[in-house]
Image (cartoon, rainbow, N blue to C red):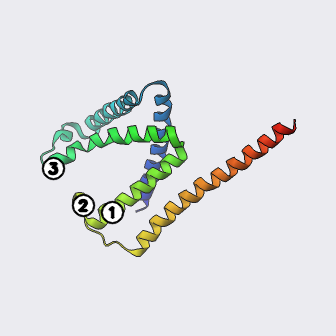
Amino acid sequence: MILGIVLALLAGSLVSLQNIFNNKVNVHVGSWTTTTIVLGLGFAASFTLGLIFEGTEMFNLHHMKTWNMFSGLIGVGVVTCMVQGINRLGPTFAVSISMCAQLGFALLFDSMGWLGLEKVDFTLKQLIGVLVVVGGIVVFKLGGREKKRMTNEHGLAASSIE
């Protein structure tokens, strides 16, 4: 379990780092070029590592359902939407909203047993947990606005005195 937690923390930090780099790339090129570069480099890296660590076994797809192979297409939406979300909302707020969506949909898929997942009973504790996370993000965003507004008011007041 500890290894799972460490890996999840690492994945979260890598996703945040990737979002920042994706946004920096998008400043210089279009959204589709950014997506192509990001997913193309990801393909090249994972293909190379797959050959190194799994060899030809990585091509043994006999037991996989056909529709599962198309899950990589979802990455196009992920990269494009995150880059655009970060452009419009900033990295912290966009990633926070994305996190809420991930948590909410993971809970939905688990509790409904969709996509081949084992059905898990939906509990009040789970609902409260999701609401606490969403509430934390609302407080985070509103708290930032108040601070920014106060800074602007003080900045305007200082410049009007001069």
1 or 2: tag closer to the N-terminus: 1
For the N terminus, which image quadrant? bottom left
User: The disc labelled 1 sits on which kind of residue?
Assistant: Leu
Q: Amino acid at mark 2?
A: Trp
Q: Position of residue 105 (x, y in %)?
A: 35, 58
> Is residue 140 shown left or right of residue 77?
right
Crowd class of label 3 (few under 14; some 14 to 19; many from 20; radius 10 Å): few
| In-image side of 36 versus 133 (left or right) | left
Q: At label 3, which amino acid type do we have? A: Lys
Foreground tag (2 vs 3): 2
Q: CA distance from mark 1 to mark 2?
A: 8 Å
SS for callout 3 = loop
Residue occupied by mark 3:
65
Q: Quadrant of the C terminus?
A: top right
On the rendered structure, is 138 left or right of 11? Answer: right
- Residue at 64% x, 51% y: name it: 144
Seen as rendered, the residue at the extreme left is 62
For marks 2 and 3 on the same chain, the one whose residue lies earlier in the sequence: 3
Q: Dot 2, crowdedness within 10 Å: few (<14), some or many (≥20)?
A: few
> Residue 8, position in %: x, y?
42, 54
Are the residues at dot 1 and dot 2 in contact (C-beta closer than 8 Å)? yes
Task: Give the distance between the C-alpha atoms of the residues marked 3 and 1, in whole angstroms.
Answer: 22 Å
> Gap between marks 2 and 3, in whole Å?
15 Å
Q: Which residue is mark 2?
A: 114
